[in-house]
């Protein structure tokens, strides 16, 4: 993919050529063509492995918490949605902005390999994109499909691209009775195997020591002891990232159990929008968020009653 | 392991009638750490306290739980008792089994069960308590009064007389408030200016009082004994120190189209103006929205005629910062807007006026020189109708649910004054009830009705219709049980009053609370009526609730006494329940700093050795002298780095566990 009509790889090469930074945080090819993973490149020749294609969904910002603290300036490639996470981390003093060269790159949506497979396409060898058309080389010959149909969930409702209604599902869940809703979440969350992938990938979860890893917090054990397995883990996390979650969608993307975790955070975002006006965490890197600021026209607690409670 | 004593109080029958005391006492004996559990009829009595003291010594207790009334009532009592027996006073926990249990339950079994839960919750917390030692903080010997109406003036005078410095911040160009706008005042009918202006002058001349007019409070930080306040002095465009107050500028100013605020918009004033003749300070202000110089760059006539050369078009708002030990809120009120009351045709007819407008019309210094004239054609009225409770005691949602308290009396005053001066005018008053409690008040009202022939009609007005230069007033007479229609020349609306709209932002700045109507809330409605729940913030006048001048002045003096009591102390005991961050867990994210209402949190870059490597990290540090222990930071901190002494995360968790057990 290109940015300003130039391949992103070229931009990366230029960074080293012009000594703009000592390291570059980008993606490199994994074991398969569809599992590109974040990587730090320290020299021009290492860039041979550099990729930027329809399988670079992962959000690089979080890696900067460690990487930007190291010696030497680091350049980072930020898709539009990743920019929010970057700003939010700068805002919370988790990234030393001075040591980072942020490069904004274009993105026309990332592909979910499982969705391609779900179309019944087997033996996939490689996929290339031309606009909305995907050309899929398989052991059984060439196949085609529309990219729009196989986008990552987070890209489907990507606010910057299509402005799709990202709260549609949240609204559906809100309309459920409390019993139905409880059942819905119980069935979803009981699939959780507590691999911690969601937390580990979440750019809002960068705590020096997470409460779930801290025996003294008295929370780690609680999150496990409930009969409704991992509900407390997810509820506590939802509260911790409330007002800070940028809706980057990484949690749902990495969950091996396919739990729609982003819906929990979107519910919080939707409420924040309704209570305090439209808010995008990480839209800038200095303003104080709605939950940590006080404005005179903030909602009063009786909003809960006025909305009929239990929503 | 703690050695805990539990003391269950019957509170006479207050608790014992609903909670089975024995069950609670026995249940507590089985709780971890408890080595003694007993009960008594009145724990707070001297005998009860001595039982506690003896038990502490006899059983070598390290902490006590008292199951009794709200800690707001007797926590101090029991802490003192514990201290007298050699225990740290913070090793005392109260389980509120009265307000939180006995008083709100009927069923004895349920209430008893809940009392047991509350008691074991307190025990669970106490097991984790640590002795705490309060520090002390200094008291800045200076008070701030916000609002310069009669309330603020009186409070300031009393504080100043006691020997302390006071600043009055008034947002208008002059002090005086609404009382300066009134004509005569009930119940004695003396002229408002005659009794108010001497007080204004006294305030201006008092060595200990500093008037900061045309100014507003911008921000407040700090706490009782040590508030830091930023005050915005709005640009007057006139140098107050050299202006002689001659007023030539106001006469010569060619821009005369602004509505006079002081005369309730009934006449005009110039762009450079002094609100009224006895204004203090007697220094004009340029209304920049009206000034031709500010609008077009031309004019500047005032500067040319000013003999003192005091006009300064380049003046800027100025921020002054000052420290105070105490703050008095005296921000008063204003009449409500009548947008929701079209039926009275206030917007449609000039001859429908509010009572405050009538005060100006009747005032010798007012727009008509004190002559009662119809605003529309400046003719003498023959029939006048007063409507009481306009927007007060209103349950339709258009107005206020409360009684504005002063309208019955001032309407009687208006009616009487008019009948006295113009016996030819027929005066009718529509009322729901006439409420005149107060010394000589009912006599006053009866005088209006009986001696002055004011026609009181019990009932509401349904509609005021302007017709052919007259006002057709349609109302009901509930006593005669009929509809009445009165052809009136003027209608006066006794308009409900509400707090000044700045109350809400001040409440936020000071963390003082307001009620649903935006009146400031008192610490206790009966026993602490002039204190706000926030230490060091006191309430004076109508900003706390509707009242007349005598009540306002009484409350103002009461607030002053509280201020003087505070300022006379050299040191205050500070609360040891303060926050602190565990630097190893802190992310340096600033979230706690954003929510801290007292500005107690700062950051330092610190070196840490982690796994043998040196790492520099930004970590939160709490200034314990500033922290008020509100706990907001601990809630917002994701990693649990921030904790509050006396209410640690672990203690709260232990309480929750005890409840859920
Ligand atoms: C029509 C009418 C007739 C009345 N007649 C009588 C009567 O005959 N007898 C009687 O006893 N009572 C009468 N009253 C009641 C009387 O006016 C009040 O009791 C009295 O004015 C209350 O004084 P206050 O200082 O509390 O409020 P106010 O007079 O309202 O003074 C408050 C002051 O604070 C200032 N202020 C407000 N907010 C701020 C801020 N944020 N910063 C700085 N300054 C601020 C205001 O500008 C004002 O100067 C009458 C009231 C009305 C409406
Ligand atoms: S779950 Fe909470 S404590 Fe853990 S990393 Fe996320 S924000 Fe921090
Ligand atoms: S990624 Fe999925 S399975 Fe793993 S902890 Fe999160 S929700 Fe549970
Ligand atoms: S408890 Fe925390 S938020 Fe509250 S005053 Fe202290 S430092 Fe500030
Ligand atoms: S909220 Fe917690 S982690 Fe963040 S700066 Fe404050 S103490 Fe540190």
Image (cartoon, rainbow, N blue to C red):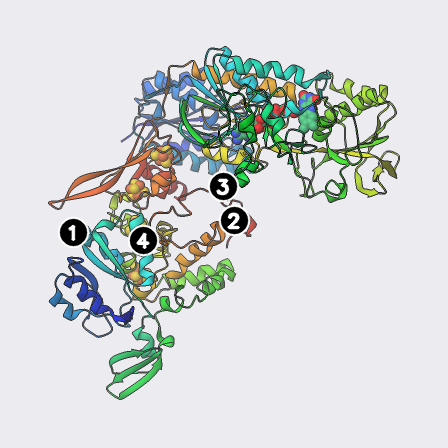
**Do tag 4 and tag 1 residues touch (Cβ < 8 Å)?**
no
Residue B15 in view (yes/no) = no
- Tag 2, which chain? A
Q: Residue at x 70, y 25 (%)?
A: B366
Q: Which mark is residue A304?
A: 2
Q: Marks 3 and 2, how far apart in space?
A: 18 Å
Q: Are marks 4 and 2 on the same chain?
A: yes
Q: Residue B69: x percent and y percent?
A: 48, 27
Q: Marks 3 and 1, how far apart in space?
A: 42 Å
Which element is circle 4 on? helix
Horizontal arrangement in the rendering, residue A222 relative to residue B69 (left or right): left
Ligand number 3: quarter of image = bottom left
Q: Dot 4 corresponds to which residue?
A: A87
**Of callouts 4 and 2, which one flags the residue occurring earlier in the amino acid sequence?**
4
Comparing B255 with B450, the one in front is B255
Specify the quadrant of the image occupied by residue B569.
Answer: top left
**Front tag of 3 and 2:** 3
């Amino acid at each position: 993919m290109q940015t300003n009509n130039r391949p992103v790889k070229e931009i990366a090469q230029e960074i080293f050529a012009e000594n703009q930074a000592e390291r570059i945080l980008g993606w490199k090819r994994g074991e398969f063509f569809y599992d590109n993973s974040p990587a730090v490149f320290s020299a021009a020749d290492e860039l041979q492995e550099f990729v930027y294609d329809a399988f670079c969904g992962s959000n690089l910002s979080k890696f900067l918490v460690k990487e930007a603290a190291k010696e030497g300036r680091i350049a980072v490639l930020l898709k539009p949605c990743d920019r929010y996470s970057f700003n939010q981390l700068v805002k919370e003093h988790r990234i030393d902005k001075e040591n980072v060269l942020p490069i904004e790159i274009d993105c026309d949506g990332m592909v979910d390999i499982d969705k391609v497979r779900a179309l019944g396409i087997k033996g996939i060898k490689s996929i290339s994109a031309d606009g909305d058309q995907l050309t899929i080389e398989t052991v059984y010959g060439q196949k085609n499909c529309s990219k729009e149909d196989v986008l990552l969930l987070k890209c489907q409702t990507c606010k910057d691209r299509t402005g799709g209604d990202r709260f549609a599902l949240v609204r559906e869940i809100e309309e459920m009775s409390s019993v139905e809703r409880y059942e819905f979440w119980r069935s979803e969350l009981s699939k959780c195997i507590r691999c911690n992938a969601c937390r580990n990938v979440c750019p809002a979860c960068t705590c020096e020591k997470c409460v779930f890893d801290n025996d003294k917090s008295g929370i780690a054990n609680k999150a496990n002891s409930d009969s409704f397995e991992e509900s407390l883990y997810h509820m506590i996390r939802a509260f911790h990232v409330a007002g800070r979650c940028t809706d980057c969608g990484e949690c749902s993307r990495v969950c091996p159990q396919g739990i729609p975790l982003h819906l929990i955070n979107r519910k919080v975002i939707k409420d924040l929008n309704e209570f305090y006006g439209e808010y995008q965490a990480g839209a800038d890197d200095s303003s104080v968020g709605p939950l940590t600021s006080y404005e005179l026209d903030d909602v009063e607690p009786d909003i809960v009653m006025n909305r009929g409670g239990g929503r | 392991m703690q050695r805990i004593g539990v003391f269950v109080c019957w509170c006479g029958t207050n608790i014992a009638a609903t909670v089975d005391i024995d069950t609670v006492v026995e249940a507590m004996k089985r709780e971890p750490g408890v080595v003694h559990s007993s009960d008594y009829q009145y724990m707070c009595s001297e005998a009860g306290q001595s039982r506690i003291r003896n038990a502490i010594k006899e059983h070598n207790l390290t902490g006590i739980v008292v199951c009794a009334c709200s800690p707001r009532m007797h926590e101090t009592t029991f802490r003192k008792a514990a201290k007298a027996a050699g225990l740290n006073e913070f090793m005392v926990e109260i389980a509120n089994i009265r307000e939180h249990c006995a008083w709100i339950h009927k069923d004895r079994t349920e209430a008893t069960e809940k009392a047991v839960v509350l008691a074991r919750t307190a025990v669970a917390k106490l097991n984790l308590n640590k002795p705490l030692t309060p520090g002390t903080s200094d008291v800045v010997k200076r008070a701030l009064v916000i609002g310069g109406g009669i309330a603020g003036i009186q409070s300031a005078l009393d504080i100043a007389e006691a020997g302390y410095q006071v600043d009055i911040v008034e947002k208008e160009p002059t002090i005086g408030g609404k009382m300066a706008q009134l004509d005569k005042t009930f119940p004695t009918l003396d002229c408002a200016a005659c009794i108010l202006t001497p007080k204004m002058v006294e305030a201006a001349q008092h060595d200990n009082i500093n008037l900061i007019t045309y100014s507003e409070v911008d921000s407040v930080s700090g706490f009782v004994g040590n508030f830091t306040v930023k005050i915005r002095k709005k640009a007057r465009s006139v140098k107050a120190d050299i202006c002689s107050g001659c007023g030539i500028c106001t006469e010569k100013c060619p821009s005369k189209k602004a509505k006079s605020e002081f005369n309730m918009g009934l006449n005009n004033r110039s762009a450079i103006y002094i609100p009224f003749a006895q204004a203090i300070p007697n220094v004009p202000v340029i209304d920049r929205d009206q000034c031709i110089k500010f609008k077009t760059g031309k004019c500047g006539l005032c500067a040319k005629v000013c003999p003192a050369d005091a006009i300064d078009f380049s003046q800027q708002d100025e921020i002054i910062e000052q420290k105070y030990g105490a703050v008095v809120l005296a921000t008063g009120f204003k009449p409500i807007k009548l947008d929701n009351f079209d039926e009275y045709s206030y917007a449609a007819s000039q001859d429908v006026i509010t009572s405050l407008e009538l005060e100006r019309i009747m005032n010798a210094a007012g727009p008509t020189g004190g002559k009662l004239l119809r605003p529309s054609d400046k003719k003498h009225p023959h029939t006048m109708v007063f409507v009481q409770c306009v927007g007060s005691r209103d349950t339709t949602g258009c107005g206020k649910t409360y009684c504005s308290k002063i309208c019955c009396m001032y309407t009687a005053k208006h009616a009487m004054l008019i009948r006295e001066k113009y016996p030819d005018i027929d005066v009718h008053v529509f009322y729901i009830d006439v409420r005149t409690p107060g010394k000589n008040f009912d006599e006053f009202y009866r005088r209006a009705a009986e001696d002055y022939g004011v026609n009181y009609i019990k009932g509401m007005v349904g509609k005021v219709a302007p017709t052919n230069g007259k006002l057709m007033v349609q109302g009901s007479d509930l006593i005669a049980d009929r509809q009445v229609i009165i052809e009136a020349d003027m209608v006066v609306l006794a308009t409900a009053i509400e707090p000044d709209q700045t109350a809400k932002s001040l409440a936020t700045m000071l963390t003082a609370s307001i009620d649903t109507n935006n009146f400031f809330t008192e610490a206790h409605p009966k026993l602490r009526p002039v204190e706000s729940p926030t230490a060091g913030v006191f309430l004076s006048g109508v900003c706390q609730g509707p009242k007349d001048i005598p009540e306002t002045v009484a409350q103002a003096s009461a607030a002053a006494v509280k201020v003087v009591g505070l300022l006379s102390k050299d040191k205050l005991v500070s609360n040891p329940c303060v926050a602190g961050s565990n630097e190893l867990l802190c992310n340096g994210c600033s979230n706690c700093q954003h929510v801290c209402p007292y500005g107690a949190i700062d950051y330092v870059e610190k070196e840490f050795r982690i796994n043998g490597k040196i790492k520099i990290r930004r970590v939160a540090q709490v200034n314990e002298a500033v922290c008020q222990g509100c706990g907001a930071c601990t809630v917002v901190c994701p990693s649990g780095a921030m904790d509050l002494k006396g209410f640690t995360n672990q203690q709260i968790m232990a309480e929750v566990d005890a409840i859920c057990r």
